[in-house]
């Protein structure tokens, strides 16, 4: 005879459904927070660079200043290219980490579900 008390049933529902849902929601929220922060950091860096370049442009007073500004543009372009590559690498890394953690969470939940199913089968037999 299969007899479950309410507490045991509630615990199984929590273990099988609610806890994994909370864990995945937490994982997703943490990923989103990291991604948004990375985007905000990148946006701020690009805005700061752009504003600095406009300020430098506005400070040109002669041909020598213009020449110096133009020479610095190559350096700024190189730095921005490196920044974009670094930002892209960071986003890829965040996605890869999220995928790996999601897979581990899924594997853990499947293992736990099998254990609960085995126990329930053993009890009913």
Image: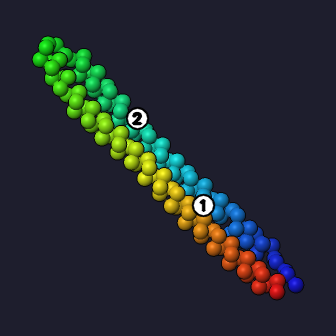
Spatial separation of the CA atoms under disc 1 and disc 2: 30 Å
- 81 is higher (above) or lower (below) than 53: below
Say which label, 1 or 2, has the lower sequence index.
Answer: 1
Residue at 56% in and 60% down: 102
Label 1 sits on a secondary structure element that is: helix
24 horizontally vs 72: left or right: right
Quarter assignment of residue 11 = bottom right
- 88 is higher (above) or lower (below) than 2: above
Residue at 44% in and 40% down: 39
43 horizontally vs 106: left or right: left
- 44 is higher (above) or lower (below) than 9: above
Q: Report the label total.
A: 2
Residue 20's spot in the image, x, y percent?
A: 64, 63
| Residue on which disc 1 sits | 23
Q: Residues within 10 Å of mark 2 (few under 14, many from 20)?
A: few
Q: How is the image coloured?
A: rainbow
- 98 is higher (above) or lower (below) than 77: below
Q: Quadrant of the N terminus?
A: bottom right
Residue at 26% in and 35% down: 78
Residue at 74% in and 67% down: 13
Q: Residue furthest top?
A: 62
Q: Quadrant of the C terminus?
A: bottom right
Q: Residue furthest right?
A: 1
Q: Nearer the viewer, residue 15 or 68?
A: 68
Specify the label residue 43 is tagged with: 2
């Amino acid at each position: 005879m299969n007899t479950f008390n309410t507490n045991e049933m509630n615990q199984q529902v929590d273990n099988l459904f609610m806890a994994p849902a909370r864990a995945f929601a937490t994982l997703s929220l943490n990923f989103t927070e990291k991604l948004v922060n990375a985007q905000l950091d990148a946006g701020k860096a690009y805005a700061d660079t752009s504003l600095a370049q406009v300020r430098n442009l506005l400070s040109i007073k002669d041909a020598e200043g213009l020449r110096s500004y133009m020479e610095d543009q190559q350096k700024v372009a190189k730095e921005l290219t490196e920044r974009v590559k670094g930002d892209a690498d960071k986003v890829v890394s965040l996605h890869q980490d999220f995928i790996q953690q999601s897979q581990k969470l899924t594997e853990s939940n499947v293992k736990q579900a099998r254990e609960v199913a085995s126990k329930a089968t053993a009890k009913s037999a």
